[in-house]
Amino acid sequence: VASLNNLPHQFVTYGSALKLEHIDTNTQLFSQDIAYGSGSQQQAVTTVQDSSSVGSFWSVRAPFRRPVQVDNGMQQQRKVQGTNVRHGDIVRLQHVESGKWLHSSHLHQAPLSKNQEICSIGGNSGTGDNWIVELDEGVSEWNKDHRVRFRHENTGVYLASHENLFGRPIQGQQEVCGFSQTKRLRPGVYWKATQGVYFQ
């Protein structure tokens, strides 16, 4: 295990626990034990300026897949911890502090922008927690020097943020939402890995 801060070209691997910085606003993807007052009423996901918060750590996990039949019974498909995350991989992002999954559904709108809602959801994981890793052209493996996009597998929206701020009880935090796909990617969908730990 090593710190991402000390290795500028370090690849992000399955099992990494890291912070994700929203490139356009220089804020950190964040969650805490406060629920939305509308929509899904699940735990809110926002971005914050405070880079020291433990609520900004997310663990990169293998995707949810329905169990496949093997000789000795049903088994969940898994990625080996320490394997590099590649362009096109499907991952889940687990909030380290709460253990909840970064989730989205077409059923709920984000409270400020009315784009698709992003939340943290507990309990059994499902396909609504799966995100496709997209890297820039010519980049095959995710490392902390490269920007990254996350496209929701079920609905196709991109994990995004913008400068709209919430009032109480999460005053000053930015909304995180899902931006729909267009022919040209909209601003606000790019992130990068910053401080954290990874597994070799």
Image (cartoon, helix red, strand yellow):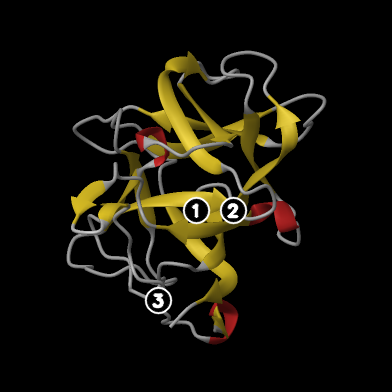
Quarter of the image that includes the C terminus: bottom left
Q: Secondary structure at mark 3?
A: loop
Amino acid found under the numbered disc labelled 1: Ile
Q: In the image, which is nearer the foreground, mark 3 or mark 2?
A: 3
| Residue 40 lies in quadrant | top right
Q: In the image, which is nearer the foreground, mark 1 or mark 3?
A: 3
Query: Residue, x 43% and y 57% (percent of image)?
Result: 61
| 14 over 170 or under it: above or below | below
- Crowd around label 1: few <14 · some 14–19 · many ≥20 (10 Å): some
Front residue of 179 and 98:
98
Q: Residue 130 location in percent, x, y?
A: 36, 42
Q: Earlier in the sequence, mark 3 or mark 2?
A: 2
- Crowd around label 3: few <14 · some 14–19 · many ≥20 (10 Å): some
Amino acid found under the numbered disc labelled 3: Gly
Q: Residue 175 location in percent, x, y?
A: 60, 31
Q: CA distance from mark 1 to mark 2?
A: 5 Å
Front residue of 149 and 162:
149
Which residue is identified by label 2? 26
Front residue of 186 and 143:
143
- Is there a contact, CB below 8 Å, between mark 1 and mark 2? yes
Q: Secondary structure at mark 1?
A: loop
Q: CA distance from mark 1 to mark 3?
A: 26 Å
- Is there a contact, CB below 8 Å, between mark 3 and mark 2? no
Query: Residue, x 57% and y 75% (percent of image)?
Result: 197
Label tally: 3
Which residue is identified by label 1? 23
Quarter of the image that includes the N terminus: bottom right
Q: Residue 28 location in percent, x, y?
A: 62, 52
Amino acid found under the numbered disc labelled 2: Asn
Which residue is identified by label 3? 82
- Crowd around label 2: few <14 · some 14–19 · many ≥20 (10 Å): some
